[in-house]
Amino acid sequence: NIDVFTFGETMVLFQAEQMLPLEYVHTFPKLVGGAESNVAIGLARLGHSVGWFSKLGDDPFGRYIHKFIRGEGVDTSSCLFTEKAQTGLLFKERLSPEDVNVYYYRKNSAASLMEPADLNEDYISQAKILHITGITPALSESCYQTVMVAIQIAKKHKMTIVFDPNLRLKLWSAEKAKEVFNEIASHADVILPGLDEGQFMTGKTEVEDVAVALMGEQDKTIIIKLGSKGAYLHTKHEKAYIEGFPVDRIVDPVGAGDGFAAGILSGLLRNDPLPVVVKRANAIGAIVVGVSGDVEGLPTLPAVERFME
Ligand code: ATP
């Protein structure tokens, strides 16, 4: 049985060991990178059962990703392996701690072949929550269609739909991203943009105006991430800034958003009041930025509670 269903592309991540232009880097520790699998691992660590789906290449990198994510306690039983394409790769260049560039080798990857027929409705509908990121629809037309069919399945089974935009302008045009983000947002119950993504989607500047525009005429929960300042929570009945937790030393800002999303999903599953949900998500984001790597810092529930004290 699963509580959350999420799906997307996870790549093997080769992280430059030396802080140099990529052409001068000799060694690349091999890691795993993918927003949806980060969220899935975060949820598993917080004690939830979560299903992550992807199409992986039938190659050593695909098997590595599969074993890694399964090893973290995520249900990967719905994953498919294909011989038609290879697993996507990603190289990360570090010129300074703040100046990080990514180089993708993911065009026409195995994951980009995901299609609506790959979705198993009986499996997905066990979950209470469908988690969607804005990366998956950017991968290909069939991935976009897969996202839209997953949303239909979630609606049919009265699942909660949570949308985290995760804008990646290397994957598609701003124009197309904006159109698709707003389409997905119109179906979502909970939207988790960073302020910059919310501004991008709505054309508004102020936090509160962004939230009002994202809400539109519908009843949604909007949670806008504000980095070190925490987050802004906006529903029909509640409007509140939820303060972030101070971080002594930022080691690696990447992955905070995914940890934050795992915290939100976990809190929703626990039926906690929304301000409590957002506060715990802020704590997880703050913990993650203090640890190197996307998933290494993701805490267990007792660890978050200790941190919050
Ligand atoms: P990512 O870089 O992973 O894509 P994001 O842009 O989606 O992240 P952020 O606003 O950077 O999202 O971070 C998500 C949450 O993590 C914030 O809302 C906040 O709660 C927490 N967080 C991030 N950075 C810091 C920080 N420097 N100090 C304290 N908390 C932080």
Image: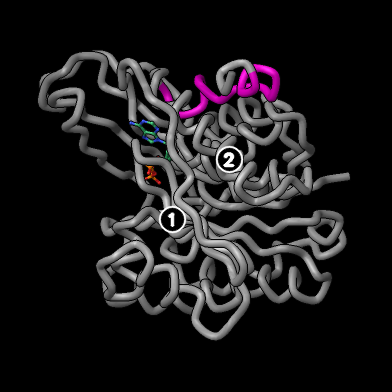
Left-right relation of 70 to 88? right
Which residue does the image show at 52% across and 72% down from the upper left? 185
- Quadrant location, the C terminus: top right
Q: Earlier in the sequence, mark 2 or mark 1?
A: 2
Q: Quadrant of residue 103?
A: top left
Amino acid on which disc 1 is placed: Ile
Depth check, front residue: 163 or 212: 212
Q: Quadrant of residue 146?
A: bottom right
Q: Quadrant of ligand 1?
A: top left
Depth check, front residue: 295 or 107: 295
Q: Mark 2 points at which residue?
A: 39
Which residue does the image show at 35% across and 40% down from the upper left? 229
Q: How crowded is mark 2: few (under 14 residues within 10 Å), some or many (20 or more)?
A: many
Left-right relation of 42 to 142? right
Disc 2 element = helix
Question: Is disc 2's CB within 8 Å of ligand 1?
Answer: no
Disc 1 element = strand
Count of numbered badges drawn on the protein: 2
Residue extent of the magenta highlight: 293-305
Q: Residues within 10 Å of mark 1 (few under 14, many from 20)?
A: many
> In x, y percent, where is residue 215?
51, 75
Q: Mark 1 points at which residue?
A: 224
Tell me whether the residue at label 2 lies in contact with that at label 1, contact meaning CB atoms closer than 8 angstroms.
no
Q: Give the numbered dot on residue 302.
A: none
> In x, y percent, where is residue 270?
78, 43
Which residue does the image show at 70% across and 18% down from the upper left? 302
From the image, state whether disc 2 or disc 1 is nearer to you: 1
Amino acid on which disc 2 is placed: Val
> Would you say the magenta stretch is mainly helix, strand or loop?
loop
Label 2, label 1: how far apart the Cα atoms are = 17 Å
Depth check, front residue: 104 or 196: 196
Q: Is residue 135 visible?
A: no
